[in-house]
Amino acid sequence: MDSAILSLLGAFLLSIIGLFVFIWSLRKGLLIENPAAASVIFARGEIGRVDDPALTDAGQQSLQDAAAPGDHRAPPGDAAELRDRIESDRSTAFPVFMFVAFACFWLIVGSLAGLTSSIKLHAPDWLTQQAWLTFGRIRTVHLTAVLYGWITNAALAMIVWLLPRLLRTRLHGAVWTMLGGALINTGIAAGIGAISAGWSDGMEYLEIPWQIAVFILVGFVFVILPVLFTLVNRKVEHLYVSVWYMVAALLWIALLFLVGKLPGVHTGVQQATTNWWYGHNVLGLWFTPVSVGAIYYFLPKIIGRPVRSYNLSILGFWTLAFFYGQVGGHHLIGGPVPGWLTTLSIVQSLMMVIPVIAFSINMGGTLQGRMHLALYSPTLRFMMFGGLMYFASSVQGSLEALRSVNQVAHFTHFTVAHAHLGAYAFVSMVLFGAIYFMMPRVLNWEWPYPRLISLHFWLAVAGISIYFVGLTIGGWLQGVAMLDAARPFMESVTVTLPWLKWRSVGGGLMVLGHLVFVGHFLAMALRFGPTRTGAALFAHNNELELAYGK
Amino acid sequence: MENEIKLASGAMVALGVATAALVVMPYLEVRDVKPPPQLKPYTSAELRGREVYIANGCVYCHSQQPRDRNLGPDQARGWGRASVPGDYYYDKPHLLGSMRTGPDLFNIGARQPSKDWHLGHLYQPRAYVPDSIMPSYPYLFTVKDAKEAQAEGEQAVTLPAGYGPNYGQVLVATPEALDLVKYLQSLNHTYPVLPAAPQP
């Protein structure tokens, strides 16, 4: 049978299946909107009340005024449910603080390593005397520290903090969570040490030697079990969409890591496909669902309005789950792998447009008429920027998988720019916003210098913009030069040089932002700075409930 | 949506489909691939050199997968014919790479067989390619007194004029550097392969 008939048959079967799914969903009432499920994140009577713990009292008030002009006394919400929430927050405070502290530490390590490797690309004789500082190692230290150290720790902090809130219960077995966190971070530290010393498994994203990876995997199991236990002991009926994204992501990353690191199984070309199955799924089935789940919680919560369409968010979840897992093969277009595999990955990369559009429509609808609140709340700004960049990086990624675009972009810095658009402009910005939101609740203390939050935001935005625009241009020029057989290879190197320098400038701003962020975090944890009572502060335990509703 | 069983099983099915497509199917398809007759297994020195290649992250700037002519001028640049799965029979871990900050190295052993060139180029790439942005690897070499090196029977690395150490001193490659160069020299996949059998 030739391929034309096969693809026609495939399309026919798909549309029949689609029809049945549609009929089934009508019967199940899935197309009827479900505002109750979307409102799970609010206590009874709390809708309409803005919430940004990172703001001062006055800031919170002006945010409320901007959200609902004229309505000065939004109700505080049901007291019993607020008490439940405080109970949840108390049960998670220790593990969340631990994860965030680790995340901050690795963020500094990772971004300094990143800046060093960026400079090394245009100053190749800088810091060459020590083996651990060579580009190939310090670059990998950067990747490991930011992906596993920063993003994974911050993501775990967010999951551990959010799930008990959403499930209206305490975190069951918080001690095990902390043990898991300790194991994971032991593994990360040992992995970074090993890579610096030249001991690496040699595959991108999977460099941590498998002997060390055992620690990380066991750590994940210790984090997952309390989460599942909390899940089955929940006190709500509806599982909010963030729960879907986050629980699924936890299960996915543990299995991905297990299969990817299995020693002695993968070999040759098959190892390459497994490598990229893992490499892209770390982004697609771990970072992305966690961050999307976070936006689904924080954004509606800050503006005090439930998400527009709960069903659209579920559609987004399942399409992401089914399409994203199979896109990894687009990293091997033109490589020595079966043709059907790259074609499958290209098709699924384009299908990723569906969950992205579902998300964007939903968020656009939710924010409708309240975009201006970003002026009042830096936390919201982080979330909105992250959400927008999710759209941008996903659409760019889908296009990049097309053979014609991939031909130029493959093997160039264009891909590096794209990776940072996803991991930084989208994921990291969401995580920053989440940490700004969570920490006052975790520590019962206000952010001491709210202006620093804005400063951090603008440094990060300026940094990633310069980084992304510069490297995208440089990478594209590099790809075009490389495809032209009449131009010597060295031209594809020299053409990138000015853009590599711009990358270092952007990276420098990002590092500066991180120093501000982590310095602010330390000041908060060590109780430096002015002592203020305000929106975020409710240290006096007797007043805790009232403060929540204030 | 209120059932955690649905959530877990759905998530696992989704991942299962992806794993089947990207891990299991290639495994079944590549399992029976035989190495081309002219492809020799790596010697132990070459394998040690391969470890040096991995330890120093060469793969982050150098691919090992020349593409077909209709995807890029890889062959015209002298990087060799498009690679086939059999070429990687002895590669563990794979080093296909995803960046070409530097050129593809799948056939560097055929393109540049000179040991002296490789050693000197590792010590200072800009002595050979003026605009190169490849890092120099001084830590893979030791500077020794010329007489001492001669007494120990060490072979000095020959460098272009102006790049060597001070007068009376010579540059000696460490065993790691020598192994690495042996590995680079072994990267020669210029033998012919049959095109993939047409699908029945």
Image (cartoon, rainbow, N blue to C red):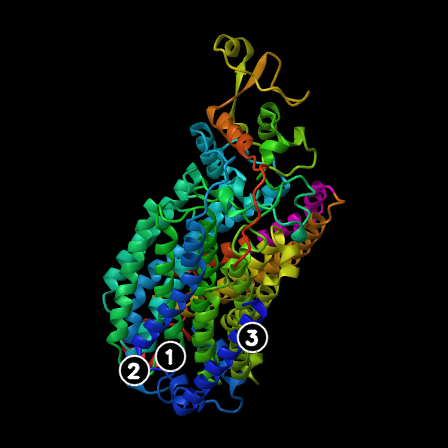
Mark before the other along the chain sequence, 1 or 3: 3
- What is the distance, in whole Å, between disc 2 and disc 1 at their CAs? 9 Å
- Residue A227: percent from the left, percent from the top? 29, 68
* Pointers 2 and 1 in contact (C-beta within 8 Å): yes
Mark before the other along the chain sequence, 2 or 3: 3
* Pointers 2 and 3 in contact (C-beta within 8 Å): no
- What is the distance, in whole Å, between disc 1 and disc 3 at their CAs? 38 Å
Instruction: Give, as a single range, the part of the protein colored magenta.
Output: A488-510
Q: Which residue is mark 1?
A: A240
Answer left or right for A466 relative to A146: right
- What is the distance, in whole Å, between disc 2 and disc 3 at their CAs? 45 Å
Q: Are marks 2 and 3 on the same chain?
A: yes
Please name which of the two marks, 2 or 3, marks the residue nearer to the observer: 3
In the rendered image, the vertical position of residue A230 relative to residue A528, given as above or below: below
Towards the viewer: A75 or A84: A84
- Report the predominant secondary structure element of the magenta stretch: helix
Q: Are marks 1 and 3 on the same chain?
A: yes
- Residue B195: percent from the left, percent from the top? 57, 48
* Chain under disc 3: A
Look at label 2 and name its amino acid.
Val
- Residue A544: percent from the left, percent from the top? 31, 77
Magenta stretch contains residue B12: no
